[in-house]
Amino acid sequence: MYIILFFQIFVMQNSLIGFIGAGNMAYAIISGLINNGIKHNQIKISDTNKALLSLRKTEFNLEVFTDNTKLAIQCNVIVLAVKPQVLSSVCKDLKNKLAINTLIISIAAGVRSRDIERWLGDNQAIVRTMPNMPALLNQGITGLFANKQVSDKQKSLAENILNSVGECLWVNDEGLLDVITAVSGSGPAYFFLMLESMTKVGAALGLDEAVAQKLSIQTALGASIVASSSEDSPQQLRNKVTSKNGTTQAAIESFQDQDFEVIIAHAMRAAFNRANEIGMELGNDK
Ligand SMILES: NC(=O)C1=CN([C@@H]2O[C@H](COP(=O)(O)OP(=O)(O)OC[C@H]3O[C@@H](n4cnc5c(N)ncnc54)[C@H](O)[C@@H]3O)[C@@H](O)[C@H]2O)C=CC1
Ligand SMILES: O=C(O)[C@@H]1CCC=N1
């Protein structure tokens, strides 16, 4: 056990991790890595946006590049953190330039590992992942899928990287990453939407907007902490808040009268379908 742990720390400490794309998710993951003891000189980033690069350089004291290839050939792990629509051109520029043992970690929604493999040149080890935005505060959760080129050592390296920003879970069926996208990848935005609505209504009913927002956010935080630490299911917890013929029952019945579950199902299926669609659209990109 200790030997495995020691070996994993050794592998992490001897990795050079390059981020292509220095936007929101790169920022979140880099913050987590640095908070977890990865040294500044082990992380490099490239982006086409020079102003953003200089901001990241100031924030993290990292080496930055405007040329993705220059970054990529120096690193043994490359995190592809660009939007799905630019991923094919980013990968094609790297085609056949990477060492065969370079580990590619993609965080792009929808884009399938076989397409990334095709764009980069065959036999590249690819871990396709779906992290989420609370990674920013080490509270993320990431789904991961490894293609067959990924070694056990690379699997644990990918897991260690994503574990530095929250929890990880592996899937053997890559298609499930699109479901994870609809649940936890996009999920934070569903809760933010709920917070927006609760704040607006609290204000409309007479509270200061700032007070309504504080009450809403602290309630979401409290509910999440209770749900994640309790043995009870969310439904059992809901019942504990709901007094017979009380205020919560009135609100829940209103939700249910308006087909709350159907609204959620439509939204999540839309996210899932969009992930599939992105995969198909980009899969046609030779
Ligand atoms: N934002 C989120 O909550 C999540 C995003 N993702 C995925 O993460 C990826 C990145 O998303 P964000 O960080 O939100 O986007 P972002 O727009 O904040 O960052 C993307 C960065 O890529 C840069 N870029 C564009 N073309 C480039 C090129 N040719 N070479 C190098 N850099 C280039 C842009 O200048 C930008 O800074 C996306 O594929 C998205 O699907 C996954 C999970 C959650
Ligand atoms: O909206 C998106 O496409 C990305 C993927 C999950 C969260 N943001």
Image (tube, rainbow, N blue to C red):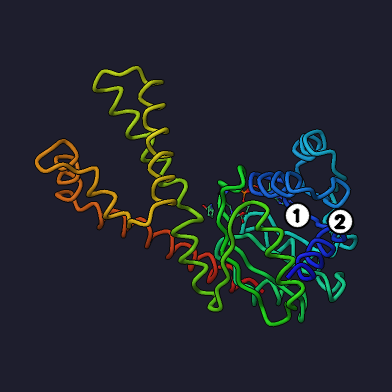
Q: Quadrant of residue 193?
A: top left
Q: Secondary structure at mark 2?
A: helix
- Disc 1 marks a residue whose amino acid type is Ile
Which mark is drawn over residue 20?
Answer: 1
Residue at position x 71%, y 61% from top?
160
Residue at position x 66%, y 58% from top?
162
Mark positioned earlier in the residue sequence (2 or 1): 1
Q: Is residue 114 left or right of residue 188?
A: right
- Disc 2 marks a residue whose amino acid type is Leu
Q: Residues within 10 Å of mark 2 (few under 14, many from 20)?
A: many
Q: Quadrant of residue 252?
A: top left
- Whether ligand 1 has any atom under 8 Å from the Cβ at mark 2 is answered as no
Which image quarter holds the C terminus? bottom right
Name of the residue lying farthest toward the front: 2
Question: x and y percent of residue 200 in the render?
Answer: 32, 28
Does the residue at mark 2 contact the one at mark 1 (Cβ under 8 Å)?
yes
Q: Quadrant of residue 121?
A: bottom right
Q: Residues within 10 Å of mark 1 (few under 14, many from 20)?
A: many
- Whether ligand 1 has any atom under 8 Å from the Cβ at mark 1 is answered as yes
Q: Is residue 280 above or below residue 274?
A: below
Which mark is drawn over residue 95?
Answer: none
Q: Secondary structure at mark 1?
A: strand
Question: x and y percent of residue 149 in the render?
Answer: 73, 81
Residue for badge 2: 71
Residue at position x 82%, y 70% from top?
102
Q: Is residue 81 above or below residue 219?
A: below
Q: CA distance from mark 2 to mark 1?
A: 8 Å
